[in-house]
Image: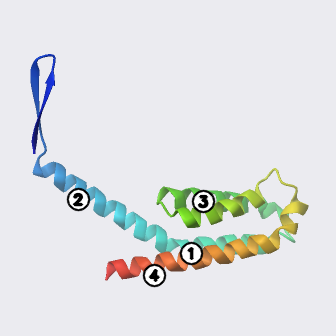
Amino acid sequence: MVSEIMTQGLAVTETETDTDTDTDTDMDSKIAALRVEFVNGLPARLDTISSLMALLNDQSEHRHELYRQVHSLTGSLGLFEYAEASKTARSMCNLVEPDIPLDDVLYSQDELNRLLAELYRQVEELVRSGQKKAL
């Protein structure tokens, strides 16, 4: 595709080459592969979060790691444009923030468990929809 741009009486011509299109296709393929790898790794990440939540009652030192894991998951889900799951993870993140007293976090465990179950459901849906796309 050729387009001309007039700048101060000078014509500048831009040409999109086949190489540019190939590069875009390669980049799209790499992003798609990263997305599949990310989605396939989500169940293990949720398992880690679940394990850390289980340790909160007896070993509160795991709280910071729990927050870090949930915060990282929230951002990653947003990066890959999984808005619904990112919103659920954000709700979890808000309940385990380091500034919140531990007693309040422990009091919120039922809500945290509900949100984690919702995330598992959302991730299962993402994995299933990714498998359908691969077929």
Q: CA distance from mark 1 to mark 3?
A: 13 Å
Task: Write down the residue under mark 4.
Answer: 128
Q: CA distance from mark 4 to mark 3?
A: 20 Å
Position of residue 18 measured from the top left corner of the image (x, y, whole percent): 11, 52
Residue depicted at 17% across the width and 49% down the height: 20
| Label whose residue precedes the other's in the sequence (4 or 3) | 3
Q: Quadrant of the N terminus?
A: top left
Q: CA distance from mark 1 to mark 2?
A: 29 Å
Residue 80 showing in the rendered view: yes
Relative to residue 3, is residue 98 depicted above or below? below
Q: CA distance from mark 3 to mark 2?
A: 28 Å
Callouts 4 and 2 close, C-beta under 8 Å: no
| Label whose residue precedes the other's in the sequence (1 or 2) | 2
Q: CA distance from mark 4 to mark 1?
A: 10 Å
Instruction: For mark 1, give the secondary structure.
Output: helix
Q: Of residues 10 and 90, which is closer to you in this image?
A: 10
Task: Write down the residue under mark 3.
Answer: 74
Relative to residue 20, is residue 2 depicted above or below? above
Q: Of residues 5 and 133, which is closer to you in this image?
A: 5
Report the amino acid beneath label 3: Thr
Q: CA distance from mark 4 to mark 2?
A: 25 Å
| Label whose residue precedes the other's in the sequence (3 or 2) | 2
Residue depicted at 47% across the width and 78% down the height: 127
Callouts 4 and 3 close, C-beta under 8 Å: no
Residue depicted at 65% across the width and 57% down the height: 71
Task: Write down the residue under mark 1.
Answer: 122
Residue 90 lies in what quarter of the image? bottom right
Q: Is residue 134 left or right of residue 117?
A: left
| Label whose residue precedes the other's in the sequence (1 or 3) | 3
